[in-house]
Amino acid sequence: MCTIGETGQNGVCKQRPLICSILDPNAWFKPERLHPQVESLIYWRDVKKSGIVFGAGLVTLVAISSFSVISVFAYLSLLALFGTVAFRIYKSVTQAVQKTNDGHPFKEYLELDLTLSQEKVQHIAGVAVAHLNGFTAELRRLFLVEDLIDSIKFGVILWVFTYIGAWFNGMTLVILAFVSLFTLPKVYENNKQSIDTYLDLVRTKLTEITDKIRVAIPIGKKPVAATESEKDK
């Protein structure tokens, strides 16, 4: 785990990003890195729109946890289809009675361009591959014990996850993650200074403990001779 002030560009830890980012809220909550529409939703810029998306998503996830995915998808699709057909008929009857020609009620959405450009797909794929490569390299470093202390910390995290898995099933974790997505960013934004203060204290204590352990158990460090030979190269 990197110490305070050991971050590189964009606030990302220069070494061991997986361990470092766990207690770094700036690595989790960066609205400028999000798409403007996504940022507007999860940070509740438009309360009405965010409320609709949050409510609909939560109801869908709760339904999936109680019924099969196929049943939930079929019922929701039928409900949406019934609503659009009823609205289409209502608008057609209204136009016939009033003798107006407003056109198709969903014309705006029918003309909406939903295609993905090749450049956009390549950009998304490039970002995904970069993150996947970094994640794979970090897991290799932790599992193959490049640094004993970091691997022990990773083991503690996995041990905590065993209890989380025993308490909650997969769907419950998905629901909690969805709720957290719409709550934690806004909470952090409104209380950033106080949260950062407490997390700095935690990181400082963890750094002190880590340094003491490294002194007591000097494993995972490169030998001096190896370091000097690397410098000669």
Image: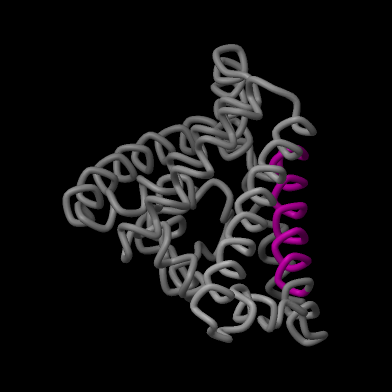
38 above or below 181? below
Q: In the image, 97: left or right of 54?
A: right
Q: Position of residue 150 (x, y in %)?
A: 58, 40
Instruction: Tell me if residue 128 is in the magenta stretch.
Output: yes
Residue drawn at x 78%, y 77% is: 121
Main structural element of the magenta stretch: helix, strand or loop?
Answer: helix
Q: Is residue 182 above or below residue 99?
A: above
The quadrant of the image that shows the C terminus is bottom right
Q: Which image quadrant for residue 46?
A: bottom left
Residue lying furthest left in this view?
194
In this rendering, the answer to whether 53 lies above or below 95 is: above
| Residue 82, horizontal then vertical, whole percent | 66, 48
Q: Using the image as rendered, state which of residue 215 and residue 167 is in the foreground.
A: 167
| Image-based side of 26 in relation to 217, left or right | left
Q: Which residues are magenta?
A: 126-145
Residue at 41% x, 46% y: name it.
Answer: 23
